[in-house]
Image (cartoon, helix red, strand yellow):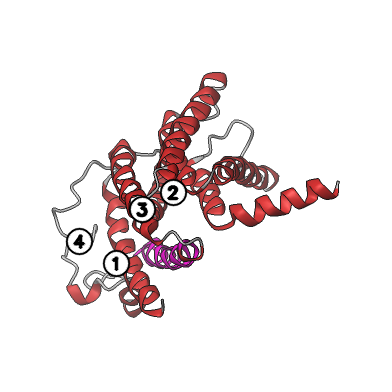
Amino acid sequence: MPVLIAVVALLGLAVGSFLNVVIARVPAGESLVRPGSHCPRCQATIRARHNVPVVSWLVLHGRCADCAEPISVRYPMVELVTALLFVATTLNVAKLHLLPALPAYLFFVAVGVALTAIDLSVMRLPNAIVYPSYVVLALLLTGASLVEGSVQPLARAAVGCVGMLAFFFALVLANPKGLGLGDVKLAGVIGAALGFLSYPALVVGAFAAFVLGGLVGGVLLVSRRATGKTMLPFGPAMVAGALVAIFASAPLVDAYTTLVHRA
C-alpha cells in the first residue's frame, strides 16, 4: 500500500499539472497540445526544469523565469489539491474494497477539480469536458464491474446517472434561474460515480451539494459579497457534495440511522 500511495501521489501532481492546462485552455477553445506551455506575457517556452509540479513555482518564487510575470498561486494549488485528493481517494477506495474501481474515481476526481476551477472562473461547465466524462467513466466502471464479477454496482450507476439527470432537470424546469443546464449535465456524471458506490451515497451527494451551496451563498450574503440576485456557480458545490458522499456517506448514514432509532 505505501508504494501505491506514493505512485498515486506523484500521479496526482502530474495530472494536476495537466489540469492547469485544461483549466486555462478549454474555456477559451484552445488546443491542449499546441502551443506548448508558455508564459502568456512574454510567450517564452517554459523549460522542463521549470515545469515540475509545485516545486518549480516555489523555486521561481511564483514568477516567470524570463519576464518575472507573476504566476498565479492557482497552479501549485491545483497540483497539490489533486495529489491530496488522489491519495485520499485511494485510501478510501481500498477501505471499501473497491480497488478495481480506483481508476474510475481518480478520473472523477480529476474532472471534478478541473470543472470546479473553470466554473469558479468563468461560470461554465464546458461540454468538452462533461460529455467525454460520461464515456470514460462508463468504460472504467464497466471494467471495474467485470473485475468484481458483479453487474449490480454498474446497474446502480446507471440508475444514479438517470436519476440525477432527471432530478436536476426537474429543478431547472421548476426554477430556470436557479440552476443551469451545465449543472444538469454534470449531475449525470456525479450520479453514475455515486450510484456505483451505493444508493445512500447518491442521496448524500445530492443533499450535501445543496447544503454546501446554501452555506456558501449564506456566507457571501452575510459578508455582503453577494446579493439575492447574484448568480453563483453551483458546479463546485456539486463536486464537493460528491466528494463528501464518496468519503463519508457510510458513516453519515450510520449516524443518521442511530439518531432515528434513538428518537
The numbered mark, 2 or 3, whose residue comes first in the sequence reads 3
Is residue 179 found left or right of 47 in the rendered image? right
Residue closest to the eye, 48 or 251: 251
The residue that label 4 is drawn on is: 37
* Chief secondary structure of the magenta portion: helix
Tell me the kind of residue under disc 2: Thr
Residue drawn at point x = 38 percent, y = 55 percent: 101
- CA neighbours of label 1 inside 10 A, class few (<14), some (14 to 19), many (20+): some
Q: The magenta stretch spans which residues?
A: 71-93
Q: Is residue 78 magenta?
A: yes
Q: Residue at x 34, y 68 (%)?
A: 13
Give the spatial CA distance, label 3 vs label 4: 28 Å
How far is mark 2 from mark 1, CA to CA? 18 Å
First-in-chain label (2 vs 1) = 1
Q: Position of residue 137 (x, y in %)?
A: 33, 46
Q: Closer to the observer: label 2 or label 4? A: 2
Where residue 162 sits: x, y (%)? 44, 30
Residue that carries the numbered disc 1 in the rendered image = 14
Residue type marked 1: Ala
Q: Taking 43 as reference, is 170 left or right?
A: right
Q: Relative to residue 214, is residue 103 drawn left or right?
A: left
Which comes sooner in the sequence, label 2 or label 4? Answer: 4
For the residues labelled 4 and 1, the Cα–Cα distance comes to 14 Å
Q: Which residue does the numbered mark 2 point to in the structure image?
A: 116
Q: What amino acid type should be assigned to the residue bearing mark 4?
A: Ser
